[in-house]
Image (tube, helix red, strand yellow):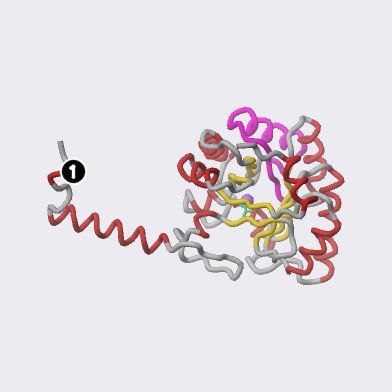
Amino acid sequence: YKRVTVKSLVDMKKRGEKISMLTAYDYTMAKIVDGAGIDVILVGDSASNVMAGHETTLPITLDQMIYHASSVIRAIERALVVVDLPFGSYQSDPKEALRSAIRIMKESGGHAVKMEGGKEVKDSIKRILHAGIPVMGHLGLTPQSIYKFGTYTVRAKEEQEAQRLKEDAIMLEKAGCFAIVLEKIPAKLAQEVAKSVSIPVIGIGAGAGVDGQVLVTHDMIGMTHEFNPRFLRRYMNLYEEMTNAFTQYGEDVKSGDFPNNDEQY
Ligand code: KIV
Ligand code: NA
């Protein structure tokens, strides 16, 4: 396989080829996602919800993100691996942000970092880029600010927030980000943003007018089943299939059906 790089993603946008991105937090899942030819694997801080069962992304630590990212990296042959900087690891100042980004690169072997926010993180982005670490931006519904928003509903529906988002996207490109994630904003606004920058814009709940799409893998394969936003397309119902498998196994053990004669030494 030819490896996906930050440069090949920008080239994909130029060619009009859409970019596919999914999350992974562990070796086994990353191997399947990478083998399926997905371009970018995000070690998202959504691991806080999906892996650890927290209500928000805020509790996950830098050490935990490094553990997830290093597991993913061991599985990858082709995909670009982007690692979220978790809440509290970059907000206080650019030096702290750089230290956190360096830890991710050194200790996990990830290829790039992602951070939430616009102009308030500009100096941190520049500092990290000066160290040669590629940065992906993230605007719109940024879950690390959920207590500021107070709701998970669509962002930037009003003109003022939409205007601010457009300015932030242009700032992120100028600062040197190689791509931007837009989460849960109106499709028309997302399309406008994608047209206004030359770096790829990857959407989640941001419509079809952007340069690529990202979903949380556990959601799209239906392993989770209580989270049902409109933007989520479920490709499998693994919650049901796994429940059936575990139930059957339980019954087979109880009845003595498992193991049979061929399943023992
Ligand atoms: O953590 C995550 O999974 C993300 C995506 C939803 C973009 O940031
Ligand atoms: Na995230």
In the picture shown, does residue 244 fall above or below 70? below
Point 14% across, 48% down: residue: 260
Q: Residue furthest top?
A: 106
Q: Label 1 belongs to which residue?
A: 263
- The x and y percentages for residue 112 are 68, 38
Q: Residue 230: which quarter of the image?
A: bottom right
- The x and y percentages for residue 82 are 64, 42
- The x and y percentages for residue 20 are 64, 52
The span shown in magenta is: 90-116
Amino acid type at circle 1 is Glu
Please tell me which residue lies in front, 112 or 139: 112
- Label 1 sits on a secondary structure element that is helix
- The x and y percentages for residue 261 are 12, 45
Q: Residue 216: which quarter of the image?
A: bottom right
Does the beta carbon at disc 1 come under 8 Å from ligand 1? Answer: no
Residue 102 magenta-highlighted: yes
Point 70% across, 41% down: residue: 90
In the rendered image, the quadrant that contains the C terminus is top left
